[in-house]
Amino acid sequence: MTTSPPAGCSFLKGPHTGIQPNAATSRRSPPPTEFHLQPRELRLHLAAAPPASSRHPPRLQSSRPRRCMLRCPPPRRLCLRLRLRLGSPVSTMASTLAFLRPSAPAPLAASRGAARGVPAAVRVPCRSRVSAAGVSLGSEVAVGSDALFADYKPTTAFLFPGQGAQTVGMGAEAVNVPAAAKLFDKANDILGYDLLDFCTNGPKEKLDSTVISQPAIYVTSLAAVEVLRSRDGGQNVIDSVDVTCGLSLGEYTALAFAAAFSFEDGLKLVKLRGEAMQDASDAASSAMVSVIGLDSEKVQQLCDAANEEVDEKERVQIANFLCPGNYAVSGGVKGIEAVEAKAKSFKARMTVRLAVAGAFHTSFMQPAVSRLESALAETEIKTPRIPVISNVDASPHSDPDTIKKILARQVTSPVQWESTVKTLMGKGLEKSYELGPGKVIAGILKRIDKGASIENIGA
């Protein structure tokens, strides 16, 4: 198949491509940026922006993307070269590659050299798909776009629990797996206390405290990954994961699994997060309650009714959109008491006061934000190797600076877990694994989709 490329790009003939070169462009262009791909089916979307000068009219006037499809049998190697004429007024074109089903160690190694026109190579397993989305650029190739995972296609997910999943006895299996036990040893050095002892022996009151439960769940969940890796076929499961997310605290675990930051840096952030949230909780009288048996619209009406009876500083809001019939409300203690008192009149089945320090994911946590921002500013965060779905907007983010802002906002923003799960299911998610203590996430997933396939991996 022969296809005319958009303005600013020429296809050069490579092994098995069957695409003819554009000789005129080849003579004028600098050395190409080369991508080595091995797909069964490659869909490549290229879009050219309008020209900056009429002296160089583009061959593609429409902003709609041109699509070409290349097919090759799995054993054959496909080499596709994209030649970008950097600096040309008609070559403002797409340069962000979105790996929809990545399973390589990193979906895109965005080096500074690429922006200078230095050839770079990206290798993708044969089952992966690659898409390039058009963006308007100047004379440089944009490699730091936050839209890298915009069109992700999930098949297998790792889901990580949040605070509340902790239980005395968790982490016991990690002792028998050297790689998992090593994580607890590292944690002890960072935290300054024996975390595994708290996990396995308690006491429960200590383990339930915010400052201990958050590091405990983070470490135990990543230890569960190592427990899975040690089992027959476990590495194959890990390699198949192409999307991850976590409930509240679990988002940090998901980012560590996706190599956005190191285990150590993630634990330091989680430690500070727990301390900052505890301090914010101590500064004001607040609480959380789960409302069972109502849809989100009814729960919002319940919150509105409760807010009419309390001062502004005691007001409540939905903090966790978990699943149909289960939404957590946060706010001042008097506001929470009003919710509990009115719940029956709204036909709620029951309310359950949560054993947490305060009104998480509301403005009550605002004092924690500045501390998190300072810590995040000093932490090296990289583009995740696979999509990590944010609790704040139920979307994946690839730009490190955006991820930092999202994490700082997370403690004062409602958790969009229901939207996250529905989006994953709608995009074709086939299999999920809950890694860490408890089976809270599995229960939530089944409430959203009874046919969902999920397996728990504990440590």
Image: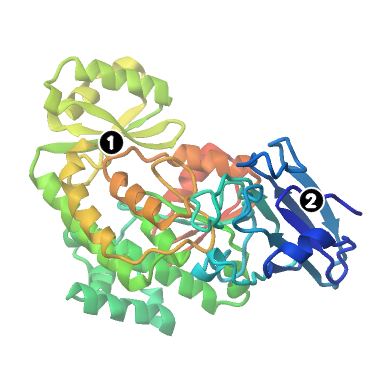
- The label on residue 91 is none
| Residue beneath disc 1 | 352
- The answer to whether residue 72 is seen in the rendering is yes
Which residue is the extreme one toward the front?
55
Which amino acid type is marked by label 2? Pro
Name above or below for residue 24 compared with residue 136. Answer: below
Q: Quadrant of residue 303?
A: top left
Residue 343 location in percent, x, y?
A: 29, 22
SS at badge 1: strand
Circles 1 and 2: CB atoms closer than 8 Å: no
- Report whether 44 appears left or right of 157: right
Label 1 and label 2: CA atoms lie apart by: 60 Å
Name above or below for residue 440 compared with residue 327. Answer: below
**Residue at point 49%, 42% (across, down):** 420
Name the image quarter holding the N terminus.
Answer: bottom right
Of callouts 1 and 2, which one flags the residue occurring earlier in the amino acid sequence? 2
How packed is label 2: few (under 14 Cα within 10 Å), some, or many (20 or more)? Answer: some
- The label on residue 5 is 2
